[in-house]
Amino acid sequence: MSASDPAVLSERIGAVCRLTLNRPRQHNPLTPRCIDELLAAVAGAGQDPDVRAVIIRSLTSPPSLNPCRADAEYSFIVAVMKAVVHVP
């Protein structure tokens, strides 16, 4: 992925919005850019009255043994879940 490529790909399949992390060679790490783009994509899907479901693929990299990173990933997952809950 180059710097100009999106960190999150968005695809509509009927009433489903599928969001896919776009750094497979790096095992889709949860970088600040990725987090921002994913939260924006979830919010955008929530504004579309035709979207009835959101699927997030490749949510995180393999489990980390670094406790600091694990806490950051947990916080991110909580933030995404809160964003999804607040979608109309």
Image (cartoon, rainbow, N blue to C red):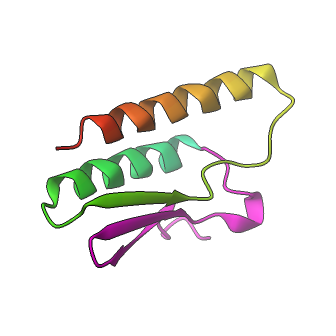
Location of residue 50 (image quadrant):
bottom left
Magenta stretch containing residue 21, yes or no?
yes
Residue sitting nearer the eye, 85 or 25: 85
Q: Is residue 3 above or below residue 75?
A: below
For the residue pair 63 and 7, the one nearer the viewer reads as: 63
Which image quadrant: the C terminus? top left
Please state the horizontal and vertical placement of residue 28, each as a whole percent of the image. 67, 56
Could you tell me residue 67's position as x and y percent? 78, 21
- In the image, is residue 2 part of the stretch drawn in magenta? yes
Residue 58, quarter of the rendered image = bottom right
| Residue 18 place in picture, x, y as percent | 42, 67
Seen from this angle, which residue lies furthest right?
A: 65
In the displayed structure, 30 sits above or below 20; it is above
Identify which residue is drawn at 43% across, 31% down.
Answer: 79
Residue range of the region highlighted in magenta in the rendering:
1-30
Q: Residue lying furthest left in this view?
A: 49
User: 69 or 32: which is nearer to us?
Assistant: 69
* Residue 31 x/y as whole percent: 59, 44
The residue located at (16%, 61%) in the rendering is: 48
Q: Residue at x 79, y 47 (%)?
A: 62
Q: Is residue 11 above or below residue 76?
A: below
In this rendering, position of residue 3 left or right of residue 45:
right
Q: Residue at x 66, y 22 (%)?
A: 71
